[in-house]
Amino acid sequence: MALSGIQIYKMLPQTNCKDCGDPTCLAFAMKLAAGKAELSQCPHVSDEAQAELAEASAPPIRVVTLGQGDAGFKVGGETVKYRHEKTFVNAAGILVALTNEDDDAKVDAELKNLADVSFERVGFTLEGNGVFCWDKKGDKDSFLALVNKVAAATEKGIVVSSADLDTLKAAGEALKGKKFALHAATADTADDFVAMAKEYGCTIVAKGDTLEDLAAVGEKFVAAGIKEAILDPGWTGIRDAVTSNIAIRRAALDKKARELGFPTIAFPCAMSEDLLEEAAYANIVLAKYAGLVVVSTLDAAFMLPTTVNRLNVYTDPQRPMTMDQGIYDINNPTADSPVIITTNFALTYFVVSAEVEASRVPTRLLIMDTDGMSVLTAWSAGKFVADAMAPFVKKSGISDVVNHKKIIIPGYVAQLSGEFEEELGAEYEVIIGPREAADLPKFLKGL
């Protein structure tokens, strides 16, 4: 159960040394209780207090890591039920289900999708996160062959599932040293899974036919000191999947139920044989509130809308996506290439840069920091205006890479052109560009 600020304060050194960055230990304790500080900020806390405080200050939904290095990903760590309250933290992982009933062509095709299918959107790479290996045949040898093939093909996350403990132990041995998960412990096998988690250093999955059954397994995990676990509510219908995820989220956040304080896994691949319906279900459970989503394919047509939706769900609603201020070269510009100035709102940058790239006209984009606002919003807020833009242009270094003094501004702020020229100086020429990014290729070709 979470501790209050006063309870945390009693376990701190109480020296008011300020090494944590706060003026007093009490202020730090209050921040810690509110989840606004990290215990590691205090260098003087005792080992005993650190162990107790680390447990108390852990997020209500634990963080789970799967996969290795740059290919790894985290789920969980969530602190709110609704995105607008603060933000969702770690985006759900999308796994493709592969079974020992699948032929080699199917397995090879999905492993290729896992490696190759990705999309760039507003500075983020959108892709699948791993494989759910499923022992559907109940055959140890064929399942281990599948697990070994997947492990050799990817460093991304792997979850292995079998009803046979010996098969899971063999898979654990094969994957030892990797960040993987074993699926799924029941009340009868929870102790065996705890032992495997400690032996192989892996995450374990709890499964129950009811929330009470699931909580009972989770309670055994917590009692055994398991920090990384996943919950499988065990239902394959979309209604039950959504309601169970909501109930688990509320229990973890509102009631501080540590036994249910782990990310969940959902199986849209088992909810429908129709691929479009499965995609709809996958997107529903992404929003409510699955940590892992298991689908039947990572085909590009399936993944593009799903990963874009995931990006939207897990984007911080209180922080606009931004680009770094600076000069961006497109199509290998020369000293004679045109220069376009715009804001650092990420969507503005990627829409404009895509159209410029499509034009094949060598161009430089001059991206100005406007706190992530779009052109009209920044203009309205007084951030994309002549007396702010001119000093930025002069300090940007653009004059060092071009041999002209021409700057193109977005058509939506055409009214700035005269004042902008005055602020820049007589040697500059301000050109009014199109209002819509889609008109940029024709405009650039006509310069």
Image (cartoon, rainbow, N blue to C red):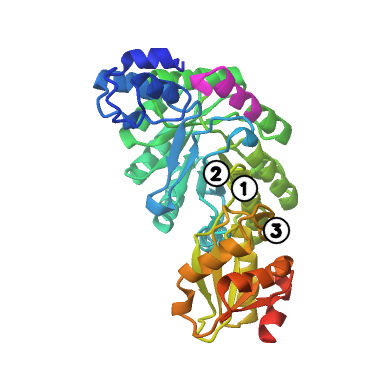
User: Between disc 2 and disc 3, whose residue precedes?
Assistant: 2
Q: Position of residue 421 (x, y in %)?
A: 62, 74
Indicate yes or no whether the magenta region holds residue 339: no
Q: Is residue 221 visible?
A: no
The reply to whether the C-beta atoms of the residues labelled 2 and 3 are less than 8 Å apart is no
- Relative placement, left or right, of 350 versus 65 is right
The CA span between labels 1 and 2 is 7 Å
Q: Position of residue 384 (x, y in %)?
A: 62, 60
The CA span between labels 2 and 3 is 30 Å
Which residue position is annotated with label 3?
376
Depth order, front residue of 235/399: 399
The amino acid type, in three-letter code, at marker 2 is Ala
Residue at disc 3, secondary structure: helix
User: Between disc 1 and disc 3, whose residue precedes?
Assistant: 1
Image quadrant in which the C terminus is located: bottom right
- Above or below 338: residue 106: above
Q: Position of residue 91 (x, y in %)?
A: 55, 44
What label does residue 91 carry, if any?
Answer: 2
Indicate yes or no whether the magenta region holds residue 249: yes
Residue at disc 1, secondary structure: helix
- Above or below 206: residue 161: below
Q: Is residue 338 visible?
A: yes
The reply to whether the C-beta atoms of the residues labelled 1 and 2 are less than 8 Å apart is yes
Which residue position is annotated with label 1?
310
- Above or below 149: residue 424: below
Q: Which residues are magenta?
A: 245-260
Q: Main secondary structure of the magenta part?
A: helix
Residue at disc 2, secondary structure: loop
